[in-house]
Image (tube, rainbow, N blue to C red):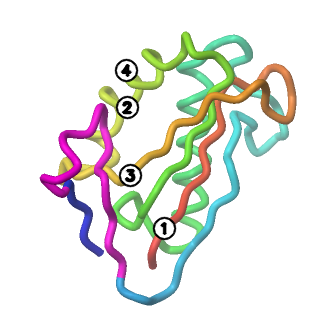
Amino acid sequence: MTIYNPKSLGTPMGQYSQVTRVKAGEFLFIAGQLSGNANDEIVGEGDFEAQATQVFANIHAALTDAGAGWENVVQFTTYLVHSQDIPNFMDFRLKNFPQFFTNGIYPPNTLLMIDRLVKEPFLIEVQTVAAL
């Protein structure tokens, strides 16, 4: 797997890369993760950072269960309910991604604004694709 930024696309506007190239192999598709915990409780109601922390903990748990890690992530698709949380999301990534992706190479991410998620208290959902 090679993650990179083609010069023809310019510099990314955050902690992500423009392209991931993966040779044919086994893929892991992780459903969009919300801030629910293993006890089916919503974590961080009204607290974006707490929700984002739980979302990425859930992603890490799914990766680990499949025998994978952050280095296997090919792409994220992120859904936010409130546009005012974009800076909070960027801050979360700036703070946490260097710990997740220790080589400093971040997978592509598509950020979408939507009206709401499956339940009102949820502020963020992240879908993940990984290559094993």
Q: Which residue is mark 2?
A: 93
Q: Vertical placement of 97 versus 115: above or below?
A: below
- Which callout, 1 or 3, points to the residue nearer the camera? 3
Specify the principal SS of the magenta part. loop
Q: Earlier in the sequence, mark 1 or mark 4?
A: 4
Furthest-left residue in this view: 7
Give the quarter of the image for residue 99: top left
According to the picture, the residue beneath numbered tag 3 turns out to be 108
Tell me how far mark 2 sits from mark 1, CA to CA. 18 Å
CB-based contact (under 8 Å), mark 2 and mark 1: no
For the point 53% across and 42% down, the residue is: 56
Callout 3: few (<14), some (14-19), or many (20+) C-alpha neighbours within 10 Å?
Answer: many
Q: Position of residue 34 (x, y in %)?
A: 70, 38
Q: Residue furthest front?
A: 8
Q: Give the residue at x 39% y 24%.
A: 90
Instruction: Tell me the residue that label 4 is attached to.
Output: 91
